[in-house]
Image (cartoon, rainbow, N blue to C red):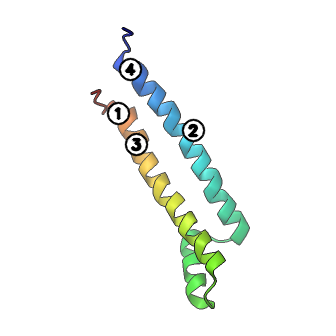
Amino acid sequence: MIKVDKEHISMFMLAEAYSEKHKTEEKIRFFKNNYQKELHEFEKYLTEINESFDLYDDYMEWKAYENYLIDLNKKIQELQSGNIQVA
C-alpha cells in the first residue's frame, strides 16, 4: 500500500487545475483574436446579423470555455485555501 499525504494530492490537483486554466485561456484568447471582440460584444453582433451556424457554433464553444474558466478559478481558490476532502 502506498500512502499519499493530503498536501501532495492538493498540490497535484492545483498543478492540474492551473494547466487546464492555461489551456482554457488560450482557447478564449483565440476567439478574442479571431473576432476582435469580447464575448459580450460577439453576443450582440450575433443578434444583429443573419443566422450563421458557424458563428453560433463558435459562440457556444466560446461561452462554454468562459464558463469553464469560472469553474476552474473557483476550484483553484478552493485548493489554495486547503478546502479539500479525501475520500
- Between the C-alphas of marks 4 and 3, the distance is 16 Å
Q: Secondary structure at mark 2?
A: helix
**Sequence order check, earlier mark of 4 and 1:** 4
Q: Amino acid at mark 3?
A: Lys
The quadrant where residue 5 appears: top left
Q: Amino acid at mark 1?
A: Ser
- Between the C-alphas of marks 4 and 1, the distance is 12 Å
**Sequence order check, earlier mark of 1 and 3:** 3
- Between the C-alphas of marks 1 and 2, the distance is 18 Å
Q: Of circles 4 and 1, which is in front?
A: 4
**Sequence order check, earlier mark of 4 and 3:** 4
The location of residue 19, given as percent across then percent down, is: 57, 38
Q: Which residue is at a point 61% across and 58% down the rendered structure image?
A: 28
The location of residue 24, given as percent across then percent down, is: 58, 51
The location of residue 23, given as percent across then percent down, is: 61, 46
The 10 Å Cα crowd at callout 2, few under 14, some 14 to 19, many 20 or more, is few
Q: Which residue is at a point 57% across and 71% down the rendered structure image?
A: 59
**Residue 7, disc:** 4
Q: Of circles 1 and 2, which is in front?
A: 2
Q: Secondary structure at mark 1?
A: loop
Residue with the mark numbered 1: 81
Q: Residue furthest front?
A: 1
Q: Amino acid at mark 4?
A: Glu
- Between the C-alphas of marks 3 and 2, the distance is 12 Å
Q: Is residue 9 left or right of residue 65?
A: left
**Sequence order check, earlier mark of 1 and 2:** 2
Residue with the mark numbered 2: 19
Q: Which residue is at a point 54% across and 69% down the rendered structure image?
A: 60
**Residue 75, disc:** 3
Q: Is residue 45 left or right of residue 3?
A: right
